[in-house]
Image (cartoon, rainbow, N blue to C red):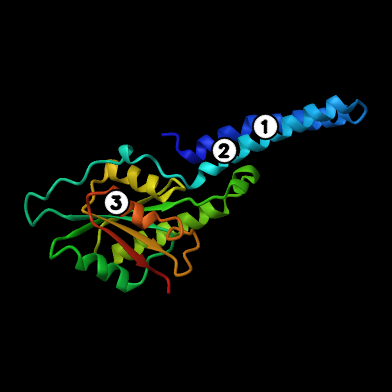
């Protein structure tokens, strides 16, 4: 699947090409007349509008029509309680696993952990994988902590949009609950962006927000 991050990377290729073209045009216009400068100015405005359009979509979530359907109701109390964790931090505190287990009402718990790879548009241009490595660390720490607490868990890195990451997770892991785990400082600005509120309107299963790492 090609997610929004990959689409932005592909979109950057023609933008870079156009910028180089405009640079060449500026050099040519330096020895030309007023009309050449006007054409260069129009070109710069067009490229600026394109850049804003491409990267301005960074915080737009997928359409609600694309949201996966709710998890099927369990056929018995022996069915596992499936929790989808979208983690912006390492969830290693015993209180985190205890809270998840407490929601299961006595059922065994299984978890899928997705750590969105939160990369800025500048990171796409500079190929800086520091944020991807940070997401992988949050993922590994959380899966280990859940396993140590007796909760079978697997994990993967996902889209840099937490809503899209949740959508992708639900397509392969129909969950009974979705947990958004954030850093105390909300470094990814999920609350400011309304991610949790959007998820509660979007999904038919309970959505929980847990602050970890405090």
Neighbor class of circle 3 (other Cα within 10 Å; few <14, some 14-19, many 20+) is: few
Q: Earlier in the sequence, mark 1 or mark 3?
A: 1
On the image, the x and y values in percent for residue 126 come to 65, 45
**Left or right: 57, with 18 as reference point:** left
Q: Residue at x 27, y 49 (%)?
A: 203
**Residue placed under numbered mark 2 in the picture:** 53
Looking at the picture, tell me which residue is in the foreground, 149 or 186. Answer: 186
The answer to whether residue 115 shows anywhere in this view is yes
User: From what the image shows, is residue 66 above or below residue 73?
Assistant: above
Measured in 3D between alpha carbons, the distance from the residue under mark 2 to the one under mark 1, in whole angstroms, is 11 Å
For residue 78, what is the image quadrant? bottom left
Quarter of the figure with the N terminus = top left
Q: Secondary structure at mark 2?
A: helix
Q: Which mark is residue 46?
A: 1
Cβ atoms under marks 3 and 2 closer than 8 Å: no
Cβ atoms under marks 2 and 1 closer than 8 Å: no
């Amino acid at each position: 699947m090609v997610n929004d991050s990959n689409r932005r990377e592909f979109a950057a290729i023609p933008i870079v090409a156009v910028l180089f073209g405009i640079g060449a045009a500026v050099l040519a216009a330096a020895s030309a007349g007023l009309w050449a400068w006007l054409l260069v100015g129009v070109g710069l405005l067009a490229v600026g509008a394109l850049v804003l359009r491409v990267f301005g979509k960074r915080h737009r979530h997928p359409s609600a029509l694309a949201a996966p359907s709710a998890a099927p109701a369990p056929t018995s109390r022996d069915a596992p309680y499936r929790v989808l964790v979208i983690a912006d931090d390492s969830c290693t505190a015993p209180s985190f696993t205890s809270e998840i287990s407490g929601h299961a009402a006595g059922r065994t718990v299984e978890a899928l952990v997705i750590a969105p790879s939160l990369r800025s548009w500048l990171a796409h241009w500079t190929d800086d994988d520091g944020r991807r490595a940070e997401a992988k660390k949050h993922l590994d720490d959380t899966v280990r902590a859940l396993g140590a607490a007796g909760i079978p868990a697997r994990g993967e890195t996902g889209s840099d949009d937490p809503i899209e990451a949740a959508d992708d997770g639900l397509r392969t892991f129909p969950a009974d609950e979705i947990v958004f785990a954030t850093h105390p400082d909300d470094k990814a600005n999920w609350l400011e962006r309304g991610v949790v509120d959007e998820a509660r309107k979007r999904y038919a299963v309970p959505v929980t927000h847990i602050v970890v790492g405090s």
